[in-house]
Image (cartoon, helix red, strand yellow):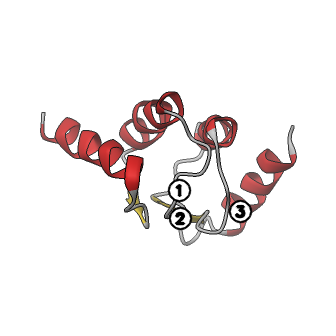
Amino acid sequence: MTVFNNYLLERINSNTSEGIINLREENIGDEEVEALGKVLQNNNTVWSIQLPREHGNITDKGLKFFVEKIALRKELLVVEANNGPWNEAFRYIEESKRL
């Protein structure tokens, strides 16, 4: 398990009563997004992920993974993600929820 996976586990475990994971200060990329998906796979208490304002090193592949495997599947309310490529990802999420 990577350091980031351990960090996410600690973050999730310490915030289960609040259901929030705050990643605002993190520089995340595709690997971290996939790790986040794996960590959240069996966790039903998280309802909000606060993402960095900048998209960091996330490619279109990572954004697609985030949208399809994390946000839509877990039905998360995602906050603090209002820049650049995140806007496109969240537009897609909102459109998908309407269908």
Q: What residue sits 78% from the left and 45% below the top?
A: 5
Name the mark nearer the viewer: 1 or 3.
3
Q: Residue 74 appears in which quarter of the rendering?
A: top left
- The kind of secondary structure element at disc 2 is loop
Mark on residue 19?
A: 2
Q: What's under tag 3, amino acid-wise?
A: Arg
**Residue 1 at x, y percent in the picture:** 87, 37
User: Alpha carbon of mark 2 to alpha carbon of mark 3: how far?
Assistant: 10 Å
Is the residue 68 above or below the residue 57 in the image? above
User: What kind of element bears circle 3?
Assistant: helix
| Relative horizontal placement of residue 36, taking residue 81 as reference (left or right) | right
As drawn, the label of residue 45 is 1
What residue sits 32% from the left and 52% below the top?
Answer: 87
- Determine if residue 51 is in view: yes
Tell me if residue 76 can be seen. no
Looking at the picture, tell me which residue is in the foreground, 79 or 15.
79
N-term mark: 2 or 3: 3
Q: Which residue is mark 3?
A: 11
